[in-house]
Image (cartoon, grey):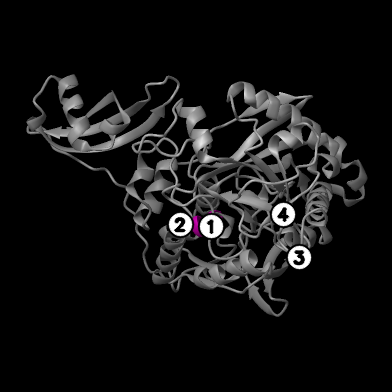
Amino acid sequence: MNIQVDIKCTPKQASNESLYLPIVAKQLKIDVSEITKSRILRKSIDARKRDIIINLRVDIATENSDFEIEKIKFEYNDVKNSEEVVIIGTGPAGLFAALRLIELGKKPVVYERGKPISERKIDIAKINRESIVDENSNYCFGEGGAGTFSDGKLYTRSKKRGSVTRILEILNNHGADDSILYEAHPHIGTNKLPRVIKSIRETILNAGGEVHFNSKLTDIIIENNKVTGVEINESEIKKCTKLILATGHSARDIYEMLYAKKVDLEAKSFAMGVRVEHPQKLIDSIQYTCDIRSEYLPAATYNLVQQIDGRGVYSFCMCPGGFIVPAATAPNQMVVNGMSPAKRDSEFANSGMVVEVKDDDLKEFKQYGVLAGMKYQEYFEQMAYNNGGAGMIAPAQRLSDFVKARISESLPKTSYHPGILTSPMHHWMPENITKRLQKGFKLFNNKMRGYLTNDAVIIGVESRTSSPVRIPRNKDNFEHITVKGLYPCGEGAGYAGGIVSAAIDGERVAEIIGAN
């Protein structure tokens, strides 16, 4: 039988088994030599006081016990000649739906509008260097979806919807570090996630599934309120009776197509704002109460939220030791997002800082019905593009200048590769967002002294926090409420937020289909 022990130790002690096992042994009142094997089950940081504590849960074996590592086993048998299920999109929802279908004896046939990772990297480089946006291959579209070139954050609150551990185990089996199995806020890193995604693709193909790139969904064929097939690239017709729609929150053409076909859609809540970037050293000093961060501590993160004038104002997708990247999916858009490598070793820390959008903000877009929020997003992105520079050069303003409503005469160094241009963002951004952000930054400075500084810069705009549209489905069988055989799934359907929750949603849909 294994013995689980919870201990508190210093960051240095937590970094090395030879340093934390004596603490375990002392707590158990045994000699450290009696411990034959060990592994970390849980690790978290408590930085509330100057002396930072690392909380560890350690699983050990002694001479009188057996050490068992309970790993989930996954059986991906040959499904080449099995019943087919069509999946649109290779984001986490689509990929994990495909893996689960294989386990259940179904053959996934996956269509992805973008390119495989190796080719997608070339198109992303063109965005950064030449401001050329391929509408089907960019930071949002392509193998792995929007998450492939992100931080690979794996933290989720969606634990009641499915097994988080199972998702982490699958990612680990496909190449993600063991640390994701025990870190309190696990992440893979933008430099490692592409290899994991490619490995998942290989698992699907080796089991007899299909993955087709450069294959854009251009129509869903519906007869008598039932799915009978899909149209790919306006030419190929693929017959199917079960369709998992996992296209992601930036596939606006899919919402337009469904709306035109009078397929039921719903408006849902979303938020928009800016990316704020600080020197990582500043965030470290605030969060760890230190001048120089210990080599045994990770780059510090933060989570800020405040109710201001009846709206939520909060940090989103915080990227310690990260970079800000251009996330537009079409020309004449200005959209930014954040990402971090596995080591989180950039000199910058960035986070989305967004404001909840409500119906009152959408009055000028009511003619678009349930797509009003999406049109408001587009308007916001176009406004940012018009107030930026040429191509992907983004509008920016020093943080204190923005709060004081004054133009920045100069801008600090930034991680945003295409470049930034000083812009009066307090003037041209929608007032409902500007005023609340200005108040929010002041209040956040009360929580993190030194946060409100002109050493920080805001860059516009952060508009793709989530989909403003939901594709409604039945609670019992996850089918669309009126179209039989259509299974909306993941972030694009409005039922997830982040890699893990989207993956869980993909699995749940696959299980419903696999049971029929």
Q: CA distance from mark 4 to mark 2?
A: 26 Å
> What residue is disc 3 on?
331
Q: Residues within 10 Å of mark 1 (few under 14, many from 20)?
A: many
In the picture shown, does residue 101 fall above or below 357? below
Q: Which residues are magenta?
A: 91-97
CA distance separating discs 2 and 1: 7 Å
**Which residue lies under the disc numbered 4?**
394
Say which element carries label 2: helix
Q: Is residue 217 left or right of residue 302?
A: right
Residue at x-position 61% and y-position 50%: 414
Foreground label between 3 and 2: 3
How far apart are the two marked residues, 4 and 1, measured between alpha carbons?
Answer: 20 Å
Eye-nearest disc, 3 or 4: 4
Q: Report if the CB atoms under discs 2 and 1 are less than 8 Å apart.
A: yes
**C-alpha distance separating marks 3 and 1:** 20 Å
First in sequence: mark 4 or mark 2? 2
> Mark 2 or mark 1, which has the lower sequence index?
1
Residue at the disc numbered 1: 149
Q: Pointer 4 and pointer 2: residues touching (CB < 8 Å)?
A: no
Q: Is residue 388 left or right of residue 176?
A: right
Q: Secondary structure at mark 1?
A: loop
Badge 2 crowding class, 10 Å Cα cut-off, few under 14, some 14 to 19, many 20 or more, is: many
Q: Looking at numbered disc 4 in the image, what kind of residue is underneath it?
A: Ala
**Amino acid type, callout 1:** Phe
How far is mark 3 from mark 2, CA to CA?
27 Å
| Camera-nearest label, 4 or 2 | 4
